[in-house]
Image (spheres, rainbow, N blue to C red):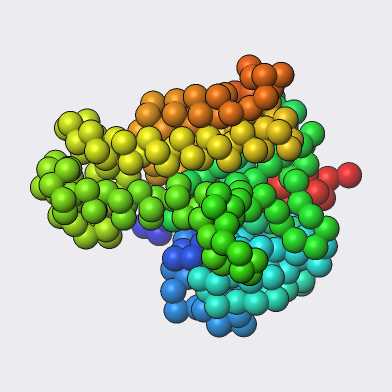
């Protein structure tokens, strides 16, 4: 017996997450319940034209899974890696994909006959936390996601903080010990000192030197094997040097948080990503103590630092929610 095709009669919003390794489309109703979805590998579609075509195909598959037609779409939201130009709806550059100046809004808008809104993928995740997650009820919320790099975004009075010509909140590039060249590439930044890549590098060195026997037993000294979960397990097993490495990275991130406090005075910070999920007590508490110790006295006690509540697919929901916000009358 063939499976009966489901149908949905109401208005829907589509969220799309353009990742470095995958592209994910979801169809949501007004309560942000998932009606249909489709996930495809990004690999093999690095050319701009073929990539845009594949994005449209993935959305089409998600609509089919939801039993929806084009004329039911209220808006499409797309979370994009790298800097975007919100004024003209283009990806300025997506280094992992080899894309530059990609007209996402116009292409998908014409393909589906509806308005399309793009934002940075980290901004989308932060907006999801603002609408449905750990930042609910905030006036000004800042999300920080330490991973391979340091991603960040901010929401103020329901609006994503964006420049006119570029997305912003590149927190990872705050210089800590800058060199003199001024080209933006040299020197020590939050990202070079606080990212999971830095932590894994230091952890591998500690394992090689015999300072982290549990990590050495579980992962060897290959950085590619050192995941956030393995780091947390090594700490739980008694590798104090690994705990010191994570503590230092979180402490330095707290310095970046203090900088943001003095700039924006947010009432809530949301920390997310694999490191936070694997060791929330160590990581979040260290960032909190570091930030509180470094802000001016008047700012102490004016902000919270909490762990993200939503899962990895939060960005796709946040992209849909931002598109809804931007297009609703």
Name the image quarter holding the C terminus. Answer: top right
The answer to whether residue 118 is left or right of residue 115 is: left
- Residue at 74% across / 35% down in the picture? 264
Q: Is residue 138 above or below residue 96?
A: above
Which residue is most to the right?
329
Residue 106 image position (x, y, % from top left): 77, 71
Residue in view at x 70 percent, y 63 percent? 84
Res. 303 visible in picture? yes
Give the number of callouts. Answer: 0
Q: Is 194 positioned to the left or the right of 75 in the image?
A: left
Image: 115 above or below 283: below
Query: Where, quadrant-wise, is the N terminus in this rendering?
Result: bottom left
Comparing 231 with 64, the one in front is 231
> Eyeballing the image, is 168 above or below 107?
above
Locate residue 169, reporting x and y percent. Answer: 67, 49
The spot of residue 150 in percent (x, y) is 52, 50
Q: What residue appears at the point 58 percent right and 40 percent down from the top-left corner?
A: 256
Residue farthest to the front, as pictured:
180
Q: Position of residue 110 (x, y in %)?
A: 76, 72
Say if residue 33 shows up in the picture: no
Q: Residue at x 40, y 59 (%)?
A: 2
Q: Nearer the viewer, residue 136 or 25?
A: 136
Q: Which quarter of the figure has residue 281?
A: top left
Q: Is residue 106 left or right of residue 204?
A: right
Rendered view: 101 above or below 310: below
């Amino acid at each position: 017996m063939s499976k009966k095709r489901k149908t949905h009669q109401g208005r829907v919003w589509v969220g799309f997450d353009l990742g470095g390794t995958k592209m994910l489309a979801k169809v949501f109703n007004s309560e942000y319940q998932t009606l249909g979805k489709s996930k495809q590998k990004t690999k093999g579609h690095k050319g701009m034209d073929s990539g845009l075509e594949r994005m449209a195909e993935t959305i089409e598959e998600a609509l089919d899974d939801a039993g929806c037609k084009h004329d039911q779409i209220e808006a499409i939201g797309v979370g994009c890696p790298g800097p975007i130009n919100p004024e003209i709806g283009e990806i300025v550059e997506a280094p992992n994909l080899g894309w530059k100046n990609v007209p996402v809004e116009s292409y998908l808008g014409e393909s589906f006959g509806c308005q399309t809104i793009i934002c940075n993928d980290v901004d989308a995740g932060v907006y999801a936390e603002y609408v449905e997650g750990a930042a609910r009820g905030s006036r000004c919320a800042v999300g920080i996601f330490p991973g391979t790099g340091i991603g960040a975004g901010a929401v103020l009075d329901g609006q994503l903080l964006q420049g006119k010509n570029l997305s912003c909140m590149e927190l990872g590039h705050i210089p800590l010990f800058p060199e003199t060249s001024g080209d933006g590439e040299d020197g020590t930044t939050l990202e070079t000192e606080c990212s999971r890549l830095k932590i894994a590098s230091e952890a591998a060195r500690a394992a090689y030197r015999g300072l982290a026997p549990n990590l050495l037993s579980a992962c060897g000294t290959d950085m590619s094997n050192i995941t956030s979960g393995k780091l947390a397990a090594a700490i739980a097993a008694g590798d104090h040097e690994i705990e010191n490495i994570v503590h230092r990275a979180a402490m330095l991130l707290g310095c970046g948080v203090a900088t943001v406090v003095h700039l924006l005075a947010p009432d809530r910070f949301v920390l997310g990503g694999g490191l936070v999920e694997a060791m929330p007590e160590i990581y979040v508490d260290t960032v909190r103590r570091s930030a509180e110790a470094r802000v001016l006295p008047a700012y102490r006690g004016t902000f919270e630092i909490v762990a993200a509540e939503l899962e990895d697919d939060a960005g796709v929901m946040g992209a849909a929610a931002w598109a809804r916000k931007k297009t609703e009358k």
